[in-house]
Image: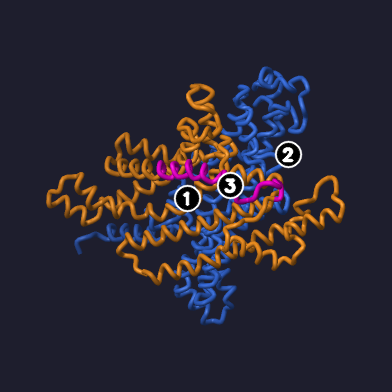
Chain colours: A blue, B orange
Amino acid sequence: MVFGTDKIESLAQAVVEADEVKGRSLYADARRRFMQNKAAMTGLMLLCLVFLFAMFGQYVAAWSNEEIDWNLLGASAELGAPSVANGHYFGTDEMGRDLYARVVQGTRISLMVGIVGAFIAVSIGTLYGAIAGYVGGRVDNLMMRFVDIMQSIPYMFILILLLVVFGRSIFMLFVGIGLISWLDMSRIARGQTLSIKNMEYVSAARATGVKPLTIILRHVVPNMLGVVIVYATLLIPSMIITESFISFLGLGVQEPNTSWGALISEGSSTIQYGTYWQLAFPLFFFVISLFSFFFIGDGLRDALDPKDR
Amino acid sequence: MLGYIFRRLAISIPTLLVLIVLSFVLMHAAPGGPFTSERPLPPEVLANIEAKYGLDKPLIAQIFNYIGGIVTSFDFGPSFKYKDRSVNDIIASGFPITLTYGFLSFIVAFVVGCALGVAAALKKNSWLDYFAVGISIGAQVLPNFVMAPILVIIFTLWLGWLPGGGWNNGHWANIIMPVIALSTSYMASIARLTRSSMLEVMNTNFIRTAQAKGLPAHVIVRKHALKPALLPVISYLGPTFVAMITGSVIVDVYFSTGGIGQAYVNSALTRDYAVMMGITILIGALTILFNLVVDILYAWIDPKIRY
């Protein structure tokens, strides 16, 4: 024997200890990669701040969003500039309302439209795509042809048509945006399903007589969750852009409610009077949040997509 | 190839029909007819007006009449709000304007985007590359309705170089800001797309072979790299076209250029359904046609795709 017993024992000890190292799951791995991404972490922090602002911002406000400061009405260009002294931290709009309270309200509605809209779109799209991909054959062909047809319709015009016909309300905006934006998701989900459905565990489930819908919900959908999450994070900003686009035209969120798009529209229409703060503050929150969402989405993609390393 | 074109056409026509029927049914589901106003009209007068516009017939007959009018004589019917103007008049006055700045934006987005992307890929990690990447990230959060006010602040209010709106028969000064506002975010996406596909192509074996046999760099780029690198960009043509048309709504409203988008928003605000439908169908048809052309172009250029 070349090695002494001590050496062998310490080696054996090392092997035993190495066995005790815990295996890392896919999500633990992804979390570690995400945490190392500086841009994504900065985005996450900024986004948390925007959320805190939306949730608790009104407790700091000196004025409510519906109150009109009669001292400043009609003189917002001269007197309405941002100041801490009179309680209008972000200044006032041309009707003498406190812009800080309005921005809090707009942030809340824009974020809500983005998140709820993305949630609707992702739920419908994932389920639709998974069913089409899993069932396959003629049903798949028919379902995807329908998606093709829907996708070649200029959706912004249909959305405006929907809003005009059924009244301009936030609810209709949700329905309209959600109805239209699940199409891309369904394509992605279908593609994922096609590869998942040939896995052994799906065959095993089928062999033991599990119903197709249960297989889709229990085995197919959870296994493409990574892709779905990435797409959902990237969908939220595009939802917010769509909502702002519609509201900018005056067809989306209506007074007394407001959103980033409506505030940007107001701010840009009064710009020639020199009330720059009316555009600057909503635009600042809009840009910051979109940046954050994009960076988080990119970070999640890098973290969750094993192919893209 | 011919069979593929026919099959694509065979899908396009039902799509268009779905679009027409969908917007027609939506229009009828709306509470309140186009002639509902604050002072109710006497029933006889209302019946007369409805007979004139054909609204007294059953829905199916109305749809058939409408489609028949479009197919046989390209007639989108009369406007419900302007008694002396038909939908065709409104489209004819706005469409050339939209087409002018839309086409220019399209060209700018593609030429500048591709050039920027190729240059960034060839000079990777240079200041040009960082500039291109920076722009393409920044422009993601600057959609047209954000660009428009920013441009007006800079070029009209601060510098005073360009007029803040109007069309002025297509004077170049009036076109610049709409084109920039409309093309920026798409130019950025195209630059990003071109950059990554160019980087990929420059790493392939046939480029290495070309370099190994001593071809000068500009010949390699022009003769070997450019064509495969620009292929993915072609599939981006269709979405960009739709975006130009959709974005024209913002441009028209913000810059008062008087294009088709302005007519659309006006008709949306006054519930002039005939105009809304006419424009929706026209744009839908154009989109379908354009996507068809792009798909055929793609199949023709890329030797790997055979239908």
Where A302 sits versus B144, above or below? below
Q: Which mark is residue B241?
A: 1
Amino acid at circle 3: Thr
Q: Chain of mark 1?
A: B
Q: Residues within 10 Å of mark 2 (few under 14, many from 20)?
A: few
Question: What is the chain letter for disc 2?
Answer: A
Residue B108: say if magenta. yes
Taking A5 as reference, is B5 left or right?
right
Disc number placed over residue A242 in the picture, else none: 3
- Determine whether, in the image, residue B42 is placed left or right of residue A17: right
Are discs 3 and 1 both within one chain?
no
Disc 2: which residue: A255
Q: Is the residue marked by circle 1 packed among few (<14), some (14-19), or many (20+) residues within 10 Å?
A: some
Q: Could you tell me the amino acid type at mark 1?
A: Phe
Task: Name the main secondary structure of what is drawn in magenta.
Answer: helix
Task: Look at 78% across and 22% down and name the residue there.
Answer: A70
Residue B46 in view here: yes
Between A83 and B52, which is closer to the camera in this rendering? B52
